[in-house]
Image (cartoon, rainbow, N blue to C red):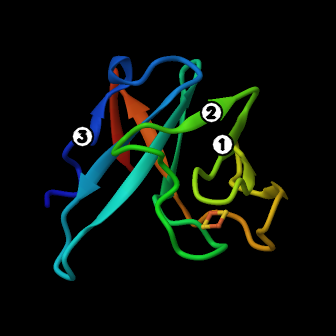
């Protein structure tokens, strides 16, 4: 994958919501959660640090409200802006990747 290629458009993500995008890599690729707050986007691997499950309840559908993302498997709760574990069965936060918004496109930094 061209690392400068956009992951999506900012407008593809509802403000306060989240989507999943696939990132190709030489090791088979991975899925990222992209969470939007206004003009900012935060990216994390779609894998919960509790038991390694996907965080979504259906492909690309996430439980997000009040700046918190809840894992659909067992309810671990993470802060959107930094991925920190806020409650539930997690002791570690989410693994994030830096992204930026350039001319309305969301890209890996
Ligand atoms: S796998 Fe996410 S809370 Fe258990």
Q: Residue at x 58, y 66 (%)?
A: 48
Disc 1 and disc 3: Cα gap in Å?
23 Å
Q: Residues within 10 Å of mark 1 (few under 14, many from 20)?
A: many
Residue underneath mark 3: 6
Which image quarter has ligand 1?
bottom right
Look at the image and tell me in which quarter the N terminus lies: bottom left
Which disc number belongs to residue 64? 2
Q: Kindly indicate the quadrant of the structure image that contains residue 103.
A: top left
Q: Secondary structure at mark 1?
A: strand
Q: Secondary structure at mark 2?
A: strand
Of residues 30 and 96, the one nearer the viewer is: 30
State yes or no: Cβ of the residue under disc 3 lies below 8 Å from any atom of ligand 1.
no
Note whether residue 109 is visible: no
Q: Residue at x 46, y 61 (%)?
A: 54
Q: Residues within 10 Å of mark 3 (few under 14, many from 20)?
A: some
Which disc number belongs to residue 69? 1
């Amino acid at each position: 994958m061209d690392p400068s290629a956009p992951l999506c458009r900012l407008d593809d993500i509802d403000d306060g919501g989240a989507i999943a995008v696939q990132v190709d890599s030489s090791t088979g690729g991975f899925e990222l959660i992209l969470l939007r707050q206004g003009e900012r986007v935060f990216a994390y691997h779609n894998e919960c640090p509790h038991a390694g499950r996907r965080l979504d309840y259906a492909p690309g559908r996430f439980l997000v409200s009040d700046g918190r993302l809840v894992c659909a498997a067992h309810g671990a709760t993470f802060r959107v802006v930094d991925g920190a574990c806020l409650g539930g069965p997690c002791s570690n936060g989410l693994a994030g990747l830096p992204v930026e918004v350039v001319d309305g496109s969301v890209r890996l930094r």
